[in-house]
Amino acid sequence: MTTRAIDRRPEDARPRAAGRRSIVVPGVLLGLGLGGFVDGILLHQILQWHHMRSGDGAGGGESLTTVGGLEANTIADGLFHTATWLLVVAGVFMLWDRSRANGGMRSWTELAGLLLIGWGIFNLVEGVIDHQILGIHHVRDDEGAPLGWDLGFLASGAVLVAVGWLMARPGGRRAG
């Protein structure tokens, strides 16, 4: 095989360049933050299915029918959005730094996969901790917290992680 033939190999088939810094951590941080934004903006604000502390009381849920309860939920939602925003900011700066150090992005497919993995991890962690263990809220507190919605949320997290992993793994990405 000539040198010229080696140079034509797809980027994914080339050995990883010495000193190349992985984008896994920043990609997953971005996915966690963006997944939190989807949850907070769509489920908390637009659909108003739940808020951070709107659970049935098992986890110290706050009523949405009182001014005090609404204030407590609004503050909790604001703190939640602040945390997701900080994850996105950290992920963007880390991604920028690593991309610059690496001479560019290896693959948009890899980044998209990592974002999906982060979003899926967000759904799984939030679904298990907030919905099941702490009970501070459920996907549909507006309907009395039916278990099917919580299980669907967990399943969506597992699917996002699986699809993201298939996209982000070295054999699953294309250069570009």
Image (cartoon, helix red, strand yellow):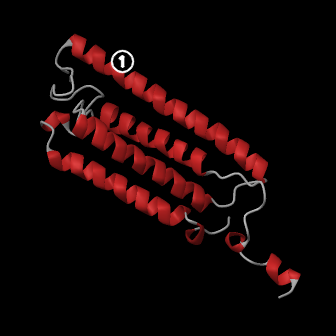
The residue at the point 55 percent across, 70 percent down is 172
Picture quadrant where residue 141 is located: top left
User: Closest to the observer: 145 or 19?
Assistant: 19
Q: Residues within 10 Å of mark 1 (few under 14, many from 20)?
A: some
Residue 1 visible? The answer is yes
The residue at the point 59 percent across, 44 percent down is 26
Q: Residue 106: horizontal and vertical position, in percent? A: 69, 60
User: Closest to the observer: 35 or 136?
Assistant: 136
Q: Residue 13: horizontal and vertical position, in percent? A: 69, 74
Residue 26 horizontal side relative to residue 134, left or right? right
Q: Residue 62: horizontal and vertical position, in percent? A: 21, 20
**Residue furthest top in the image:** 68
Residue 80 horizontal side relative to residue 128, left or right? right
Is 64 located above or below residue 45 in the figure?
A: above
User: Closest to the observer: 101 or 92?
Assistant: 101
Residue 115 horizontal side relative to residue 157, left or right? right
The residue wearing badge 1 is 75
The residue at the point 71 percent across, 46 percent down is 98
